[in-house]
Image (spheres, rainbow, N blue to C red):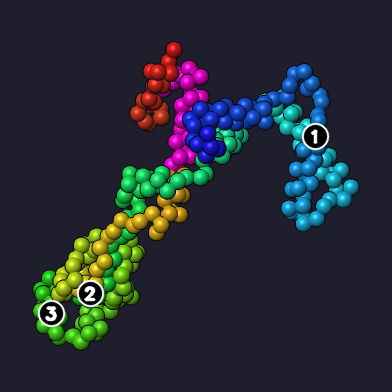
Amino acid sequence: MSILKLWREPLVHFLLLGAAIFSFNELTREVSSEAPDRIIVSSGQIEQLVANYKRTWMRTPTEDELNALVEGHVREEVFYREALAMGLDQDDSQVRRRMRMKLEFILEDLSPQDVTDEELASFMQQHPDKFRIEARITFQQVFLNPDNYSDLEAEAEKLLAGLNGGAAAEGQAELLGDMTMIPGASQLATKSEIARFFGERFAGDVIKLMPGEWTGPIYSEYGGHLVRINDRIESSQPVLDEVRVQVEREYLAQLRKQQKDQAYEQLRKRYEVSVEPVNTESVNTKPVKAARAADMK
């Protein structure tokens, strides 16, 4: 069996998960009761101290500097053990959060990093909207400020008749409307790009239009707009090569989340969880959901 096939075996992931949890417990467990007053600075730890120093200062530490690094490590270990002995790690939300993050990082490292084109193609098929290329339009717009008209609809109808009858020269149509800082024309813009200037309402309406005559008014948060679509490229589903980086990023992110969720579910089975009732009036919320029946033994 090849290494790649072996890596994809669920049993391998389970064994690695167990090893990761064991390593995590070893790294974070309290000092052994057999030798509570013994601190061993291993050669591997010294090499790590030297490597960290070299990354920071771009040189090897001197003998005195190395001694100071080792003593700093011992100082940290002494304070860490004493803090654990005093229970300073208990009921500390920041410590709990950091411990959780460390374990989640370990679990993420267990997720496979090499994926095949077949896996990515299948992921694209399962999430077509996530990778779909947006429709793009080239359009012109003439702005009508509602503060300037008692009947904006009537003014729009009059201007439309002139625009579609050739009253304005090419590229000069926006001069017929009211002054505005928003662009009079946009080239091959997507709905999201249009929304940045005109708002979601206008973008949602204008992206549906087809090339042809002037139409409107189409409303934005600023007022009314007369619009003509000059060109349109329809939405399309890309091939994998066009969006491989994005697909791989999304796929691996989902894989990491699934890995963590599965690990959590396995670990949670080891605990009996119960939630005490609370006075809902005092917390001003709905009753806390009881623990899952499967967890109650």
Amino acid type, mark 2 = Asn
Q: Is residue 18 above or below residue 136?
A: above
The residue labelled by disc 1 is 42
Q: Bin the neighbour count of mark 1 within 10 Å (Cα to Cα): few under 14, some 14-19, many 20 and up.
A: few
How far apart are the alpha carbons under marks 3 and 2?
13 Å
Q: Nearer the viewer, residue 14 or 134?
A: 14
Q: Nearer the viewer, residue 149 or 87?
A: 87
Measuring from the top left, give residue 252's x and y in whole percent.
47, 44
The residue shown at (24%, 60%) is 204
Measuring from the top left, give residue 93's x and y in whole percent.
57, 34
The residue labelled by disc 3 is 164
Amino acid type, mark 1 = Ser
Name which quarter of the figure residue 36 lies in: top right
User: In this view of the protein, can residue 28 be seen by the observer?
Assistant: no
Quick one: label 1 or label 3, which is nearer the N terminus?
Answer: 1
Quick one: label 3 or label 2, which is nearer the N terminus?
Answer: 3
Q: Residue furthest front?
A: 1
Magenta stretch holds residue 276 = yes
Measuring from the top left, give residue 125's x and y in whole percent.
32, 47
Q: Quick check: marks 1 and 2 in contact, CB under 8 Å? A: no
- Region rendered in magenta: 253-280
The residue shown at (42%, 51%) is 247
In the drawing, does residue 204 fall left or right of residue 126? left
Q: Quick check: marks 3 and 2 in contact, CB under 8 Å? A: no
The residue shown at (27%, 60%) is 235
Q: Bin the neighbour count of mark 3 within 10 Å (Cα to Cα): few under 14, some 14-19, many 20 and up.
A: some
In terms of secondary structure, what is the magenta stretch mainly?
Answer: helix
Q: Is residue 203 above or below residue 270?
A: below
Magenta stretch holds residue 186 = no
Quick one: label 1 or label 2, which is nearer the N terminus?
Answer: 1
The residue labelled by disc 2 is 230
**Disc 3 or disc 2, which is closer to the eye?**
2
